[in-house]
Image (cartoon, rainbow, N blue to C red):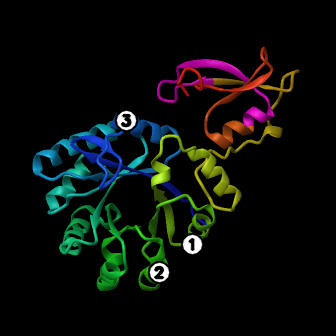
Amino acid sequence: MEQKNIVATIYLKNGQAVRGIEDHTPLADVIELAKLYNDNGIDKIIIFDLSDDDEEHEKNIHTIKNINRNVEIKTCAGGNINRLEDIKKFIYAGCLQVIVNGAKANSIELAEEASKRFGKDRILVSVENVDFVFKHQAKMNENFHELLVLNTSVLDAIENITDVPYVVYFETCDYEKIIEVLKRSNTRGIAGGFLNDPNTNIMEIKSQLSSAGIKMDNFDPALKWDDLKKNSEGMVPVIVQDYRTDEVLMLAYMNEEAFYTTINIGKMTYFSRSRQELWTKGMTSGHI
């Protein structure tokens, strides 16, 4: 089974993050939100441009450029795509992929042109029903890297028409259904409103999915606790470095519980010898 992705969604209105396509209530600073997703275990960000005119479109493009300067995970953008130039702008803004809207009449023509220009690996399509896939089934593999399926009830029908892989959008967190969908060979990942919530513990979700047999990117280490040499207190010293500069930031100690807690939640957790308890770096200072 290939590794599955957890995908967050950012909706942009006038250069700001908002709650959704219909609900334009502003959220937190969009760059900080993107950084949070980057640091908390999200594998990919889909950014939807909700602009109504060219001026707002350019403002959102500028915001997308700033997002891509501040995150390392891949991003994908869609919304307000009416011509090839719009696809090109998203790609030049640093997005790895672009999503065309399957509900729009000219989407297949745009996808054909864009896949020839930029490669099909950069082109996705969002669908809510099987109409687009059924109508263009002969062109799906030729022009699309992936589908964003917005309605879980159409998965069986889509799989009967095309073998193009997909990401599935879930309205709510239904673990039983999510596990069933992620075990399908054509599923690349999941998205959903609950994954966009900054308070959602993404690493905990990945840990639960891993326990159910789903292959996730959740920092599973090459070394186990038993492989490590302990000190007289049964602990190991941990040197923390900035991976970009190699600057040494701190020294702390882990016991076995701290070691596996770190792996499970994706945040560095140590054992305090003075307090005789676990502590997760950043819970007080905010610097995880």
Residue 79 screen position, x and y as percent: 25, 57
Q: Which residues are magenta?
A: 240-259
Residue 39 screen position, x and y as percent: 50, 37
Q: Nearer the viewer, mark 1 or mark 3?
A: 3
Residue 79 lies left or right of residue 265; in this view the side is left
Mark 1 = which residue?
Answer: 184
Dot 2: element: helix
Quick one: label 1 or label 2, which is nearer the N terminus?
A: 2
What is the C-alpha distance between the residues marked 1 and 2? 10 Å
Which amino acid does the dot numbered 2 rest on?
A: Glu
Residue at the (84%, 23%) spot, across then down: 231
Dot 3: element: loop
Which amino acid does the dot numbered 3 rest on?
A: Ala
Residue at the (67%, 36%) spot, across then down: 262
Which amino acid does the dot numbered 1 rest on?
A: Arg
Mark 3 = which residue?
Answer: 28
Q: Are marks 1 and 2 in contact (CB under 8 Å)?
A: yes
